[in-house]
Image (cartoon, helix red, strand yellow):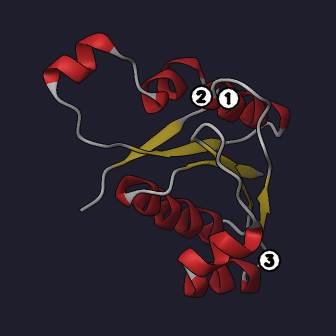
Amino acid sequence: MTIVLAHADSEPGRAALVAALREATDHAERLVVVPATRGAHLTVEAVTEEAPDLVRALLAAGGEVVVEEGSVGDPSDAVVQVAQRHDARLVVVGLRHRSPVGKAILGSTAQRILLDATCPVLAVKPG
């Protein structure tokens, strides 16, 4: 099976990475990492640098880490499309604190993933 991570270079993004790596390791699964920020480019090496011990544990358990660039456009759409293409059992996304005004004016990438994903979504807060 596959877990898809909506990756962001932020504190919530790092919390989501840790949660996704632990979940993938527990089940020896493939972790597909998708950049969740417009214009972001990501490599397996960069993911490994963020959490080297957890990546090694996943590989030792028989899992793997793959980075897949989403299509051009909205990052939430890319994450949902990748999850559907891989028949993911889980999507993991980090949540950041937003002000009431920010919540009313703009939807977040995480919110759109929660609403549009066809599989369960694990929303992770840093802390």
> What element does badge 3 sit on?
loop
> Mark 2 against mark 1, which lies toward the viewer?
2
The residue under label 2 is 76
Q: Amino acid at mark 3?
A: Gly
Q: Is residue 75 above or below residue 25?
A: above
Q: Are marks 1 and 3 in contact (CB under 8 Å)?
A: no
Judged from this view, the residue extending furthest toward the left is: 100
Q: Amino acid at mark 2?
A: Ser
Residue drawn at point x = 31 percent, y = 51 percent? 125
Q: Amino acid at mark 1?
A: Val
Q: Is residue 35 above or below residue 20?
A: above
The residue under label 3 is 62
Q: Position of residue 105 (x, y in %)?
A: 29, 12
Could you say which is closer to the camera, residue 23 or residue 79? Answer: 79
Q: Are marks 2 and 1 in contact (CB under 8 Å)?
A: yes
**The C terminus - image quarter:** bottom left
Gap in angstroms between the C-alphas marked 2 and 1: 6 Å
The residue under label 1 is 80
Q: Who comes first in sequence, dot 1 or dot 3?
A: 3
Residue drawn at point x = 70 percent, y = 58 percent? 42
Gap in angstroms between the C-alphas marked 1 and 3: 25 Å
> Mark 1 against mark 3, which lies toward the viewer?
1
